[in-house]
Image (tube, helix red, strand yellow):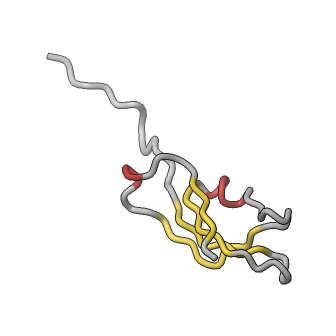
Amino acid sequence: MRSPKTSGAGLTIAPVFRALLICGDGGCAETFEAYGSLDELEALACDCGCVLEVLEISELEDVDTMCGFELARVR
């Protein structure tokens, strides 16, 4: 009986992060919670067009429950 082959050496699943973000425009101050890769989180913009700034970020341990990128308004 042959051993099952792995998909490759090392980790093949990118880490997923949870971030609390705020709009960079002081007059807007929208707050968002987002889940995704660092590249996805860095590319986010507010509905007003300004860059979202990271207030808090943490790596998720249980990525099996995540099904891709997610962004939700907090306020």
User: Which quarter shows the C terminus?
Assistant: bottom right
Where on the picture, by quarter, is residue 35? bottom right
Q: Residue at x 66, y 53 (%)?
A: 40
Q: Establish if 9 lies above or below 56.
A: above
Question: In the rendered picture of this protein, how many numbered marks are placed on residues?
Answer: 0
Q: Residue 45, position in %: x, y?
A: 77, 61
Q: Residue 48, position in %: x, y?
A: 84, 66
Q: Establish if 37 lies above or below 4.
A: below
Q: Residue 63, position in %: x, y?
A: 41, 54
User: Which quarter shows the N terminus?
Assistant: top left
Q: Residue at x 63, y 68 (%)?
A: 73
Is 75 or 66 nearer to us in this picture? 75
In the current view of this chain or complex, which residue is farthest to the left?
A: 1
Q: Establish if 9 lies above or below 58.
A: above
Q: Residue at x 76, y 74 (%)?
A: 23
Q: Residue 5, position in %: x, y?
A: 31, 26
Indicate left or right for 22 with 24 as reference.
left
Indicate left or right for 3 with 13 as reference.
left
Q: Residue at x 76, y 80 (%)?
A: 29
Where on the picture, by quarter, is residue 4? top left
